[in-house]
Amino acid sequence: MEAQPKTIQVVVNKPRVEVAITIQKTDPKLLDELVMTKKTEKAEILSKGFSVNVIDTKEAATRNLQTNDLLDRSVGVRVRQNGGLGASVDYNLNGMSGNSVRVFIDGIPISTYGSSFNLNSIPPALIERIEVYKGVIPAHLADDALGGAINVILKKGAKNVVNASASYGSFNTIQSNFNTTFRAEKGFTVKASGFYNYSDNDYEVWGKFVYNILPNGRYEYIRAKRFNNMYRSYGGRIEAGYTDVKWADVFLLAYNGSADFNEIQHGQFMTKPYKGRFTEADAHAFSLNYAKKDFIAKGLDFNLNAVYSRRNEVVNDTVKWNYNWNGQPALGLYGDPVLSPTGAQQGAPTINHITRNVLSVRGGFNYNINEQHKIIFSNMFNTVDRDDYDEMKSALERTFQQTRDLQKSVSSLAYEMQVLESSLRTSLFGKYYSQSHEMRNPVIVNQNGQQTVVEDVSKNTTTTFGYGFAGSYFITPEVMVLASAERAVRMPSDGEIFGSPGENITPNPGLRPEISDNLNLGFRLGTYKIKKHNITVSASAFWRNTSDKIARQANDRVNDAIQTAPFVNLRESQSVGFEATLEYTYNNRLFITANTSKFNSLYKLKYDNNGNILPFYNQQLPNEPFFTVNANAQYNFKDIIQRESEFNVFYNLGYVDPFYTAWLKIDSTRTPAQMVHDLGLTYAFPGKKFVLGFDARNVTNRQVYDNYAVQKPGRAFYVKLNYTFGNF
């Protein structure tokens, strides 16, 4: 750049003299527009080559949406829930489900915090963003997430603000939360948040899965309300420490406490309603979070997150009568109440106390060799010490506790590179997995004519390796291609090995690790900006070849008295499919997103031990929805009623193709097609400190099914208030 000559006179009369010089170009030109761009955190994550969705929670925080609702509308994600608010949840990412998909809170497994602190209870207002990795996951999430990972990033902004919200709606549902952050000038920081959720969950159910058995044995199909389905949870989190100081970017000590009460309406299927079966749980977690850039040496970043928690759960089931869907005792042929053949609603009577002491430590180093090259090391260590004590066992059995211990360690080493002016980005990584478990059960045996207790001991240790890569290449700034592949490993979880009475899961200590070869190929076009129009298109194809897939055993014949099932290894399976997303914005007022996912998840073991072709070879795995479509639209109106106000209108459509819940493809195991329409409104008053929201869910009152054809709530309405104030 050439400048016009300019002469100035400087008087040097002190050690330091500052002079301001303004120059002009020799050929100055006026610019119509100057645009400065910087990648957002979302764009940075999307550009690293992984098959990933990044979900923003800003708009959802003002509406009556749960975190699981946001996930269920994201491409390639299907949330599987056994009922309404508080019901147990599974996540399906492109055909991989259950514990193949790990859920993290800021990189720490959410299971550490206990069942009462889950994605049902954490409101979007407390979340900065949600990262959904499908198939291949980055090295910094050092865990055995074979099918993918959901990483929830909680809000960390050090703003002296308080945000609170409360909502009320159908089925006597109350949801409320608050969060606040205070930071002093010298870095002392305090953060606090809390939530309270309640619902009767007494929504109406009907159809081929809802019937009473009459005294003469005939089926009476009825419409009935769920009557043993109440849910309540509450919790809080407080953090204190220092942020953005010389010796630490983050140093926070935290306590997280939560509790819940959950009535259980039925077992794995809806065929037998329960009454009086419920769980109570609480958890107390203490954590340390430390992070420092340029730790010890320039370019060396260090992070450590350690959590110790004590989790308690009680499964209570002592009611001895069978019940029908009217909430009344079932009657026999002579009009007498029918006793449960096992003595309780599900199996033998139980008041089972389960105590877990959990330690989870994640630490790692990032070494930035220069702007183009980085080395990442991360380790996740997790240990679970579980004791079971059942008040309903005999006095002799109660003298010995059931103990279960599990230890797991996952270490990862990765090398990241950016070359060709950051157009090409690659990540190569390797992982080492190690897990051991021990289970001790007291068993009564008869020795020399006397009853005595002996311990049945089961032990196992497993180690293995995994590896993979991810890469992206920007052909132009708006055209990116990506690829990722991984030999992934997933160890069985403590609930799958030791069982989970509250979820009707029986033990299976012989489970083997699940191993999968994952491949993703995709592209991303945009964002293309044409005057007031913005368009982005992305698509990817995926292939998963899995050995010893761990899945809940599917039962073709439902036994009303026993609705428990273990997790088993399915030997060989394969998932192949694609997903696509279209995003369109007009004038920053109209926002439209549409996505679809289609895959085949097939059983690939062809022969039995005798060389005969297995009947289920090449068949779709049961209880796996394989074709979904989601579309949503939002329009923003300015200055409605008042100046500086905003009025937003939302619409969402969700479609799920029919699928079967068992290997036997008959009408009673077929879950029909589902199409759901949701509407929403929000009004932000001037200053946006006060926001009023209204949501109408499933406005056409369609039957909506989920895990094992369990019916979800029908038409429902909710109103929500949000208030924010700050500068204190």
Image (tube, rainbow, N blue to C red):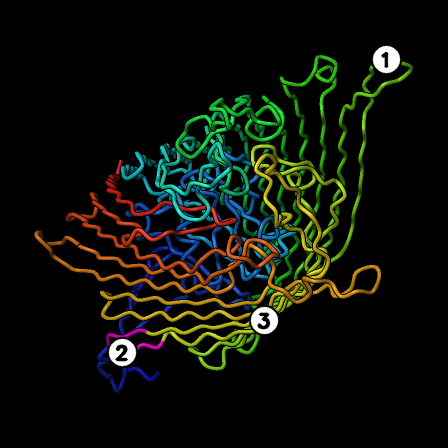
The reply to whether the C-beta atoms of the residues labelled 2 and 1 are less than 8 Å apart is: no
Measured in 3D between alpha carbons, the distance from the residue under mark 3 to the one under mark 2, in whole angstroms, is: 51 Å
Residue ID for mark 1: 450
The three-letter amino acid code for the residue at tag 2 is Lys
The three-letter amino acid code for the residue at tag 1 is Gln
Classify 10 Å Cα crowding around label 2: few (below 14), some (14-19), many (20 and above).
Answer: few
Please report the bounds of the magenta region as a residue range. 528-534
Check disc 1 and report its element: helix, strand or loop. Answer: strand
Q: Residue at x 44, y 45 (%)?
A: 154
Farthest-out residue, left? 641
| Residue 503 point in image, percent of width and height | 56, 37
Sequence order check, earlier mark of 1 and 3: 1
Classify 10 Å Cα crowding around label 1: few (below 14), some (14-19), many (20 and above).
Answer: few
Sequence order check, earlier mark of 2 and 1: 2
Q: Would you say residue 533 sits in the magenta stretch?
A: yes
Measured in 3D between alpha carbons, the distance from the residue under mark 1 to the one under mark 3, in whole angstroms, is: 67 Å
Measured in 3D between alpha carbons, the distance from the residue under mark 2 to the one under mark 1, in whole angstroms, is: 109 Å
Quarter where residue 588 is shown:
bottom left
| Residue 110 point in image, percent of width and height | 54, 42
Q: Residue at x 28, y 79 (%)?
A: 530
The three-letter amino acid code for the residue at tag 3 is Gly
In the image shown, does 172 or 52 lie closer to the viewer? 172
Check disc 2 and report its element: helix, strand or loop. Answer: loop
Farthest-out residue, right? 448
Q: Quadrant of the N terminus?
A: bottom left
Q: Is residue 526 visible?
A: yes
The reply to whether the C-beta atoms of the residues labelled 3 and 2 are less than 8 Å apart is: no
The reply to whether the C-beta atoms of the residues labelled 1 and 3 are less than 8 Å apart is: no
In the image shown, does 640 or 593 lie closer to the viewer? 593
In the image shown, does 313 or 214 lie closer to the viewer? 214
Q: Quadrant of the C terminus?
A: top left
Residue ID for mark 2: 6
